[in-house]
């Protein structure tokens, strides 16, 4: 579960509802099926007009990505993996890495290692892997764009919903007692449209871009590590190259791990 997404959605709802209570706005006006229909169904219809059916079929998968924690190898784990693999390759040869392939869950890394073990040309391996990354980034951009566009449509449809509500309210001025409630209800669509657009859709788009960037960085590290194995670089060279991918915190953890490993027990 992506706890940050859950916190954001729940926090946004709590902020809006609490603000309404503090301002004295009646929460009962939120029970407005017409407003929800205009915003939710209207935004959905606008998205279907903007994107192909094939791209819209991915919408449930995008929601799953937003709310489910991705299982990716960390950059620190990748560094340990490639340093260990390089030691094995230098002492036993690249074919000795076959035993590691079945243990790898990431298909991108597994594909890269298979090409390394098969001894394919380094330029060819880089081209294949980088093409895979480019295709992934394009898919991710399409997914983020769906939410970005939804964030533009929803507030505008909120204005449309308010206009519809006002027309209905002003169309019957004979009942003055209900007029105020009808006008308040008319603006529920605006409230809902802004909430969907700026609390949900635009932030979801940003999160998809952030997750895509993180995955791209990890895959780029896999590319460099795999090519380093293919060209027979030493464990020390691979370490220096891949450490640059680590965050400052992970670099400290890596240094501490090395110091602990290099320490030898002393006799009393």
Image (cartoon, rainbow, N blue to C red):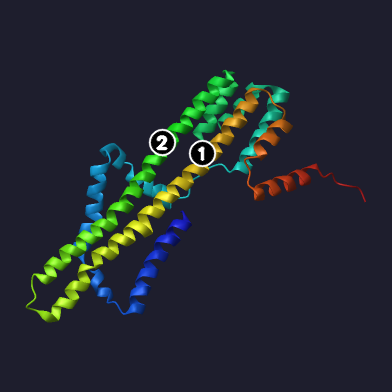
SS for callout 2: helix
The image position of residue 112, as x and y in percent, is: 55, 27
Residue pointed to by mark 2: 138
Instruction: Identify the residue at horizontal 57%, vertical 18% (top origin).
Output: 121
Residue at image position (23%, 43%) is 49
Q: Which mark is residue 216?
A: 1
* Res 47 seen here: yes
Report helix, strand or loop for mark 1. helix
How crowded is the residue under tag 1: few (<14 C-alpha within 10 Å), some, or many (20+)? Answer: some
Residue at x 29%, y 77% (from the top left corner): 25
Report the number of discs. 2
Res. 34 image quadrant: bottom left
Q: Which mark is residue 103?
A: none
Q: CA distance from mark 1 to mark 2?
A: 11 Å
N-term-proximal mark, 1 vs 2: 2
Q: Is residue 84 above or below residue 126?
A: below
Q: Is residue 7 above or below residue 257?
A: below
Q: Name the residue at 77% across, 47% down.
A: 260
Circle 2 residues within 10 Å: few <14, some 14–19, many ≥20: few
Q: Left or right of 47: which side holds 81?
A: right
């Amino acid at each position: 579960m992506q706890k940050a997404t859950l916190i954001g959605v729940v926090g946004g709802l709590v902020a809006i509802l609490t603000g309404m209570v503090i301002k004295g706005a009646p929460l009962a006006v939120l029970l407005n099926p017409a407003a929800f229909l205009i915003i939710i169904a209207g935004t959905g219809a606008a998205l279907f007009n903007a994107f192909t059916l094939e791209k819209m079929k991915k919408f449930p998968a995008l929601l799953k990505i937003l709310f489910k924690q991705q299982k990716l190898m960390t950059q620190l784990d990748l560094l340990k993996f490639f340093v260990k693999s390089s030691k094995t390759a230098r002492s036993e040869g690249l074919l000795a890495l076959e035993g590691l392939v079945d243990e790898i869950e990431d298909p991108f890394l597994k594909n890269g290692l298979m090409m390394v073990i098969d001894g394919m040309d380094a330029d060819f391996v880089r081209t294949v892997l980088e093409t895979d990354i480019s295709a992934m980034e394009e898919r991710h951009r399409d997914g983020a764009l769906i939410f970005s566009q939804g964030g533009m449509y929803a507030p505008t449809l909120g204005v449309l919903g308010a206009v519809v509500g006002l027309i209905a309210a002003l169309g019957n001025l004979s009942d003055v007692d209900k007029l105020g409630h009808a006008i308040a209800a008319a603006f529920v669509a605006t409230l809902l449209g802004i909430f969907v657009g700026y609390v949900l859709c635009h932030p979801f788009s940003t999160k998809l871009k952030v997750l895509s960037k993180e995955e791209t960085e990890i895959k780029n590290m896999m590319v460099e590590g795999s090519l380093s194995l293919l060209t027979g670089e030493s464990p020390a060279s691979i370490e220096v190259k891949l450490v640059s991918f680590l965050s400052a915190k992970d670099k400290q953890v890596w240094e501490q791990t090395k110091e602990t490993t290099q320490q030898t027990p002393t006799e009393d």
